[in-house]
């Protein structure tokens, strides 16, 4: 029988991936002194989702991808279900190929994230265009997608360090 | 190969997400209620998470203040001198207005109450722009209240929870506001453009309007009172015109929520809706004690 301290540690480990996503969500929406910060932080929840689905799928089920997407829709005031659906699609794609991704180099994973980011951004642009029934300017979407792709290594490094320091303890 | 259970799991969640999307179309009021309930739940976390950003902003502002204090002082002194002249003129005109209204038995057409709320979240995606403020229905906030920044209009309240409210900013794709170009009596519709500058629609291309012209609310529709400052005309190209807003929409810290209603405005459907949705106003919001600051 495991002691309560060990059980608490296990619970902490299980919560880490979800908590990191929620933290990134909160960082994304709080007011920052510069608008650039908002553009940089907007892709962080998706980056965390991609990282945990590939590296710790046992602690990040598909339901969490739905919930994180749902919370993002709620807080951003977007139509409910849109981000949840795009995150589910990203999760489904990454989870199915994770064994393959784990054998590849980081550059390969970065490229895959780029594809996921473009897909999610395109879906958001399409929904926005459908909502106002006109093609909206694609520039902000492209800019945010590019910034997101550029910052992926930095976020991955932080999450990797976090994962190693928490999950390597047994 | 994926296990069969995983497919079922994915299918259930995808169906749920699609159902949510459908709900947006057929039951918008329910979706709005769900959204604001969850926003209320997250408000304390957002409030706590906003603290480091506020601290950084405070330090940066303090450093800027120290660096530019002499220059700022000189500028303010000059502004005070100019404003003294305007104050005298305003006082003179207010007295004149009072006398004329008395002579004409003029009935004041509007009732304005307001409260101040802190911005705890800037929730801008690629196209939608709104902020969440720490004041809700318990503070007297009601749907369609006008949100004002330091320099002018910033948007209007679209959702009200018990503890927090969502303000749709005027650069959101869904925002429309009837405006007027000062000095010309020319009316237009302000339309949010997401990340770009807001557009002014329906300005006839043959009308000559110079960039720099002040744009104010026209008061049409009854939701916004007339003559609230919005911005200046930035650029004009053919039939298109863009507005440079007075308010710094990406650096809002505090907003003033204003409830505007026409006196005895029962004939105005907008105000009727506003009244039906409004809880009983707390004493601090009643006329005679209009100002309330909310931390």
Image: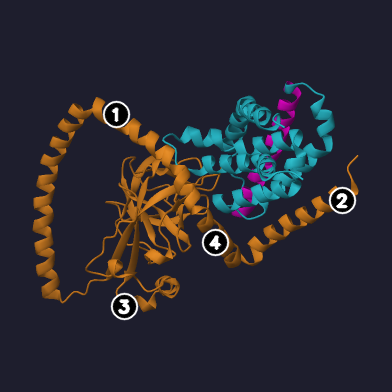
Chain colours: A cyan, B orange
Labels 1 and 3 share a subunit: yes
Q: Is B152 part of what is drawn in magenta?
A: no
- Badge 4 sits on which subunit? B
Residue B289 left/right relative to B167: left
* Residue B263, percent from left and from top: 29, 74
Q: Which mark is residue B264?
A: 3
Q: Earlier in the sequence, mark 3 or mark 4?
A: 4
* Residue A128, percent from left and from top: 61, 49
Q: Are marks 1 and 2 in contact (CB under 8 Å)?
A: no
Q: Give the spatial CA distance, label 4 vs label 1.
A: 39 Å
Labels 3 and 4 share a subunit: yes
- Badge 2 sits on which subunit? B
Question: Which residues are the magenta region?
Answer: A107-133
Q: Is A128 part of what is drawn in magenta?
A: yes
Q: Give the spatial CA distance, label 3 vs label 4.
A: 33 Å
Q: Earlier in the sequence, mark 1 or mark 3?
A: 1
Quadrant in which residue B286 is drawn: bottom left
Residue denoted by label 2? B5
Residue at 55 percent of width and 51 percent of height: A75
Q: Earlier in the sequence, mark 1 or mark 2?
A: 2
Residue at 49 percent of width and 33 percent of height: A37
Residue denoted by label 1? B64
Residue denoted by label 4? B37
Q: Are marks 3 and 4 in contact (CB under 8 Å)?
A: no
């Amino acid at each position: 029988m495991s002691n309560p301290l060990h059980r608490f540690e296990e619970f902490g480990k299980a919560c880490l991936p979800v908590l990191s996503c929620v933290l990134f969500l909160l960082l994304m929406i709080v007011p920052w002194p510069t608008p650039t910060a908002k553009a940089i932080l907007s892709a962080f929840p998706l980056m965390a989702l991609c990282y945990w689905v590939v590296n710790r799928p046992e602690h990040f089920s598909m339901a969490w991808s739905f919930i994180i997407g749902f919370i993002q829709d709620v807080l951003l005031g977007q139509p409910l279900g849109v981000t949840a659906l795009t995150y589910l699609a990203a999760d489904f794609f990454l989870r199915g190929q994770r064994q393959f991704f784990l054998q590849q180099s980081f550059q390969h994973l970065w490229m895959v994230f780029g594809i996921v980011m473009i897909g999610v951004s395109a879906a958001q642009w399409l929904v926005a265009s459908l909502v106002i029934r006109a093609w909206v300017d694609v520039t902000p979407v492209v800019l945010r997608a590019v910034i997101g792709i550029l910052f992926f290594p930095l976020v991955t490094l932080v999450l990797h360090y976090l994962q190693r320091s928490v999950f390597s303890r047994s | 190969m994926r296990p069969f259970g995983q497919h079922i799991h994915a299918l259930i969640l995808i169906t749920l997400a699609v159902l949510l999307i459908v709900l947006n179309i057929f039951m918008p009021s329910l979706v709005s209620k769900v959204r604001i309930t969850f926003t209320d739940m997250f408000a304390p976390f957002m409030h706590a998470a906003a603290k480091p950003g506020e601290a950084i902003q405070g330090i940066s502002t303090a450093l800027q203040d120290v660096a530019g204090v002499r220059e700022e002082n000189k500028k303010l002194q000059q502004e005070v001198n100019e404003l003294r002249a305007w104050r005298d003129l305003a006082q003179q005109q207010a007295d004149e207005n009072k006398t004329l209204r008395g002579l004409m038995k003029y009935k004041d057409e509007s009732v304005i109450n307001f409260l101040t709320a802190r911005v705890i979240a800037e929730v801008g995606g690629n196209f939608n722009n709104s902020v969440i403020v720490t004041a809700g229905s318990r503070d007297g906030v009601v749907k369609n209240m006008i949100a004002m920044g330091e320099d002018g209009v910033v948007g209007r309240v679209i959702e009200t929870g018990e503890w927090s409210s969502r303000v749709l900013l005027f650069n959101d794709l869904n925002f429309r506001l009837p405006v007027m170009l000062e000095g010309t009596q020319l009316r237009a519709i302000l339309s949010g453009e997401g990340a770009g500058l807001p557009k002014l629609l329906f300005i006839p291309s043959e009308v000559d309007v110079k960039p720099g012209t002040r744009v104010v609310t026209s008061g049409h529709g009854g939701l916004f009172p007339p003559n609230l400052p919005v911005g200046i005309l930035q650029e004009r190209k053919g039939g298109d015109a863009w507005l440079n807003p007075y308010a710094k929409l990406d650096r809002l810290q505090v907003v003033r929520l204003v409830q505007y209603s026409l006196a005895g405005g029962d004939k105005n459907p907008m105000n009727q809706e506003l009244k039906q949705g409004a809880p009983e106003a707390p004493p601090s919001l009643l006329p005679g004690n209009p100002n309330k600051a909310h931390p």
